[in-house]
Image: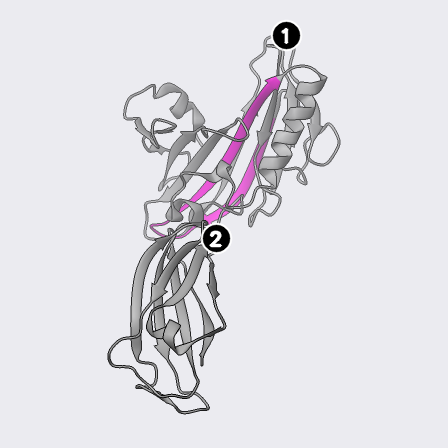
Amino acid sequence: MGSGNWESFINVGSVGCTAELDGRQIAFPEMPTVVAGVVLSRKLYTPPSGTGAIRLLDTFRNTTDAPITFVARARRESMAPVTFPTIDATSNGDTSVAAVDNWDVLSTITGVTHSDIWQGDTAPHRADLVDGSARMTELGWTVTVPANSSISLVAFATQRPNDAAGKAAAAADAALIASASATDAIFAGLTKEERARIINFNTVLPPAVATLRVRPTISRKAFLAGMPIALSCSSACTARVRLVARATSEGRLMATHGVLLDEVTTTLGTTRTAMKLYPTKRLVVSRTAFTTYVKVTVTDANGNTTTTSARVRVS
């Protein structure tokens, strides 16, 4: 499938192309499109594991100081001289492509079953122009690209044997990709900026969330020896961990309200990490019970920040 003037990409050969992501992605140079003021670039990627597929990321860049509205097109065309492919399945459950569909499965004369996936089940911007047949399927997204900005379309293709099992597997592949969440491996390697530009799949990663485990009650001796905590994160993140004094009903914690008692900055993953937080010399602890807090602020690889905290009773 190709967007815009895809003939340019066929003819470019290796001139100006660069390898990325350990050789699993080929970046093509920018090409002019049929729309004045808009240029098109492409990245072709195949993941190292999971569902076998290729990923095409086409980016339309507005080079002008004014918004431009146009139809971004994707087309699959068969050049078979005699026998055209047959459409075996679509996401709508029939054998003809319509605006409601997200993918189709075709049998080709070369003995393979092929699937095209052109938008996600929760796509923020769906195709509004569809012309589908076994010979050619063409889709269009009416888009407005802001001045000096870009939007992207992403599409996928898979291949299976041309038999009953292969056709069922191709349909399963397509359905899985169309329903994929932003965390799935099929979107691996996309930067935060690339994800934000994609309009036909929901590729925005949810912010990482830290899971904080503390003992709700500890002894004064244990507190002074270092408060044990355990942390994990829903994805790789950098965590700022703080032990904070707060005013309590007992009024016995002799420290400035909100003063930082201890701080640790660490890198977290989904595996639980154990550590200790220590009170500083500025803290004067009375002989009665008091309450303190552990506060964790995490920043994930996409720059999203979330905060969580837990209360600890020291007696």
Name the quarter where the C terminus is drawn: bottom left
Type of colouring? one colour
Could you say where residue 261 lies in the image, as x and y percent from the top left? 30, 75
- Quick one: label 1, few (<14), some, or many (20+) residues within 10 Å? few
Question: Which circle marks residue 82 in the picture?
Answer: 1
Secondary structure found at label 2: loop
Q: Residue furthest left?
A: 281
Residue at position x 51%, y 34% in the image: 155
Q: Amino acid at mark 1?
A: Val
Residue at position x 43%, y 36% in the image: 58
Q: Nearer the viewer, residue 232 or 70?
A: 232
Could you say where residue 54 lies in the image, as x and y percent from the top left? 49, 27
Q: Residue furthest top?
A: 82
- Residue 132, can we see it? no
Q: Amino acid at mark 2?
A: Ser
Secondary structure found at label 1: loop
Residue at position x 34%, y 19% in the image: 13
Query: Which residue is the site of mark 2?
Result: 234
Could you say where residue 138 lies in the image, as x and y percent from the top left? 58, 30
- Residue 292, can we see it? yes
- Residue 258 counted in the magenta span: no
- Residue 142 counted in the magenta span: yes
Task: Nearest to the eye among marks 1 and 2: give it.
Answer: 2
Predominant SS of the magenta segment: strand
- Quick one: label 2, few (<14), some, or many (20+) residues within 10 Å? some
Question: Which circle marks residue 114 in the picture?
Answer: none
Q: Mark 1 vs mark 2: which is more N-terminal? A: 1
Could you say where residue 120 lies in the image, as x and y percent from the top left? 58, 42
Q: Is residue 49 left or right of residue 228?
A: right
Where are the magenta residues, as a range?
Answer: 137-160
